[in-house]
Image (tube, rainbow, N blue to C red):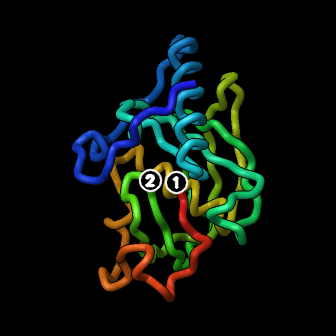
Amino acid sequence: MTVRMILRMGDPRLQRVARPVEKGSSSLLESLLEDMFDTMAAADGVGLAAPQIGIDLRVVVFGFDQNERYPEALAVPRTVLINPEIEITDSTEEDGWEGCLSVPGMRGLVSRPIGIRYRGLDEAGQVIDRSASGFHARVVLHECDHLDGVLYPQRIADLRDFGFEDALGAAEPSDELD
Ligand code: NI
């Protein structure tokens, strides 16, 4: 078990467009995925993208049954997603409070489309092809943004809706992501 250090906003490694995973890198990938799940669990997160631990690859993990920090969120299946592609299937936007392990202690209100289809490969090289909505879609969109060097504060429409978690008394406590 290796809990890796999570990079914080401002680190240029979080701003890169990550490289696709190429075939034949399975042993490397196996230890990367182990570290990502260990790191995510240690931080009590619901998702993590490889760039957040300094790995320049298009890999995200997410999922939880129940999470103490997001008591109202519905379960999201434990998922490894390699080289993901996202298609917006319902472009209606919904606001939600997000947090990020790379932006500790803060929350911001982010508008995102409510329906997506996502595709990619799992850890065994099997195709994942799913539709998602609500919190599940938000988690996937947030994590995949990391692969394009985008952190959620860049998506906040009004910076008055961005602040320290303990100062945002009115903010919903249930919508933090990774
Ligand atoms: Ni994040």
**Residue at position x 30%, y 80% in the image:** 159
Q: Check whether the beta carbons of the residues at disc 2 and disc 1 lie within 8 A of each other.
A: yes
Please identify the quarter of the rendering in which residue 42 is found: top right
**Residue at position x 47%, y 25% in the image:** 21
Q: Which amino acid does label 2 sit on?
A: Leu
Residue 139 in the image, given as x and y percentages of width and height: 58, 57
Q: Which amino acid does label 1 sit on?
A: Asp
Look at the numbered disc 2 and say if its residue's Cβ is closer than 8 Å to ligand 1.
yes
How dense is the environment of label 2, judged by Cα within 10 Å: few (below 14), some, or many (20 and up)?
many
**Quadrant assignment for ligand 1:** bottom left
Residue 141 in the image, given as x and y percentages of width and height: 52, 57
Nearest the camera: 46 or 87? 46
How dense is the environment of label 1, judged by Cα within 10 Å: few (below 14), some, or many (20 and up)?
many
Q: What element carries label 1?
A: loop
Label 2 – label 1 distance at C-alpha? 5 Å
Q: What residue does disc 1 label?
A: 178
**Residue at position x 31%, y 45% in the image:** 14
Looking at the image, residue 56 sits to the left or right of residue 50; the answer is: left
Look at the numbered disc 1 and say if its residue's Cβ is closer than 8 Å to ligand 1.
yes
Q: Which comes sooner in the sequence, label 2 or label 1? A: 2
Looking at the image, residue 107 sits to the left or right of residue 43; the answer is: left
**Residue at position x 50%, y 50% in the image:** 143
Quarter of the image for the N terminus: give it.
top right
Please say if 134 is above or below 9.
below
Nearest the camera: 150 or 83? 150
Count every numbered label the image shows and give the total.
2
Nearest the camera: 34 or 117? 34
Residue 75 in the image, given as x and y percentages of width and height: 76, 58
Q: What residue does disc 2 label?
A: 101
